[in-house]
């Protein structure tokens, strides 16, 4: 099947961004709009998504907000189809919605596993399943799935998150090889640590099972040099435009990935050290 057109980069493009109300999704939506794309910000936090869309419009961009729970396939399919029929094309879908879960596996309940996998993995599957048939018919488009460096390197204290993000990386790379012949691109974003609500416990987008104070959690977070989401989005869109398969940002996190590939044993010891540091902080919090 020969492509019937080509994906627009990014002026005049139509893009859906799930999880578009905050964090990376919000930054991607704003960056896309600045580059001339019409953006649909899809999120369960509809009021916040509407605020972002309004902010984009007041600065001359094109954006709409849509209520979407990515665990609901019928709703996801309806949003994708409505966007396509309204605009006459669909250039991008950023399957970005996700949640975090921090803590040792011994503290998990089955509902914790299910919630993380439902949003982080099944939410991506729903976006793919809804958009891919449309992109195949039109002969072009780009699916961009958000995973994590934790989808490349096993990371202690976030086992369910790691499992979901490894699956997203595998899904993306397997699909990329199939889709290319039809003119459809597929990429995976693998953020290191970005300053987003998903990493702040106690919120709607994350859950911390370990007994740790907000101050201690914040201290551990800051040690990892979080990148501002706007900076992440700028670099991510440049890499997406180049049709990169695996996009690791900030780039220094590539060293962590390379270390794991070079010596899984050494990477294991680094991870074990990180676990000990986290538990020390949690223990100090529990004793105060």
Image (tube, rainbow, N blue to C red):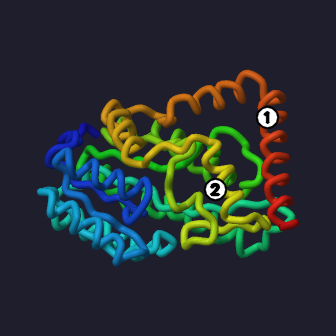
74 shown above or below 175: below
2 or 1: mark nearer the eye: 2
Label 1: which secondary element: helix
Could you tell me residue 228's position as x and y percent? Answer: 44, 46
Quadrant location of the C terminus in the rendered image = bottom right
Whole-number angstrom distance, CA of label 2 to CA of label 1: 21 Å
> Image check: 11 left or right of 179?
left
Residue 176 marker: none
> Image check: 193 left or right of 283?
left
The image quarter containing residue 18 is bottom left
Label 2: which secondary element: helix
Lower position in the chain sequence, tag 2 or tag 1: 2
Residue 270 marker: 1
Residue, far left: 60
Q: Nearer the viewer, residue 201 or 185?
A: 201
Q: Nearer the viewer, residue 276 or 8?
A: 276
Could you tell me residue 229's position as x and y percent? Answer: 42, 49
Query: Is residue 169 visible in the rendered structure shown here?
Result: no
287 shown above or below 230: below
Q: Residues within 10 Å of mark 1 (few under 14, many from 20)?
A: some
What residue is shown at x 54% (from left), y 44% (from top)?
226
Residue, far front: 288
Residue, far top: 262
What residue is shown at x 41% (from left), y 32% (from top)?
244
What residue is shown at x 68% (from left), y 70% (from top)?
114
What residue is shown at x 25% (from left), y 58% (from top)?
39
Residue bearing mark 2:
218
Q: Nearer the viewer, residue 213 or 254?
A: 213
Quadrant location of the N terminus in the rendered image = top left
Could you tell me residue 122's position as x and y percent? Answer: 55, 63
Could you tell me residue 184's position as x and y percent? Answer: 34, 42
């Amino acid at each position: 099947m020969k492509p019937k057109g080509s994906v627009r980069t990014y002026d005049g493009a139509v893009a859906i961004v799930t999880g578009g109300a905050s964090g990376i999704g919000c930054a991607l939506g704003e960056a896309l709009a600045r580059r001339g794309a019409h953006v649909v910000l899809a999120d369960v936090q509809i009021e916040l998504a509407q605020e972002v869309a309004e902010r984009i419009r007041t600065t001359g961009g094109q954006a709409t907000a849509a209520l979407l729970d990515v665990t609901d396939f019928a709703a996801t399919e309806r949003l994708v189809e409505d966007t396509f029929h309204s605009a006459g094309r669909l250039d991008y879908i950023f399957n970005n919605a996700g949640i975090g879960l921090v803590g040792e596996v011994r503290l998990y309940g089955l509902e914790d596993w299910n919630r993380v996998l439902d949003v982080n993995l099944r939410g991506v599957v729903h976006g793919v399943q809804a958009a891919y048939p449309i992109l195949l018919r039109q002969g072009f488009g780009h699916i961009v799935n958000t995973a994590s460096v934790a989808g490349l390197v096993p990371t202690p204290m976030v086992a369910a998150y790691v499992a979901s993000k490894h699956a997203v990386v595998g899904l993306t790379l397997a699909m990329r090889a199939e889709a290319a012949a039809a003119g459809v691109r597929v990429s995976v974003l693998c953020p290191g640590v970005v300053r987003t609500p998903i990493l702040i416990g106690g919120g709607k987008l994350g859950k911390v099972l370990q007994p740790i104070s907000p101050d201690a959690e914040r201290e551990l977070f800051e040690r990892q040099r979080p990148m501002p989401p706007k900076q992440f989005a700028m670099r991510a869109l440049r890499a997406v435009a180049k049709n990169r398969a695996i996009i690791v940002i900030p780039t220094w996190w590539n060293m962590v990935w390379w270390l794991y590939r070079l010596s899984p044993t050494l990477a294991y010891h680094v991870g074990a050290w990180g676990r000990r540091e986290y538990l020390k902080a949690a223990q100090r919090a529990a004793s105060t």
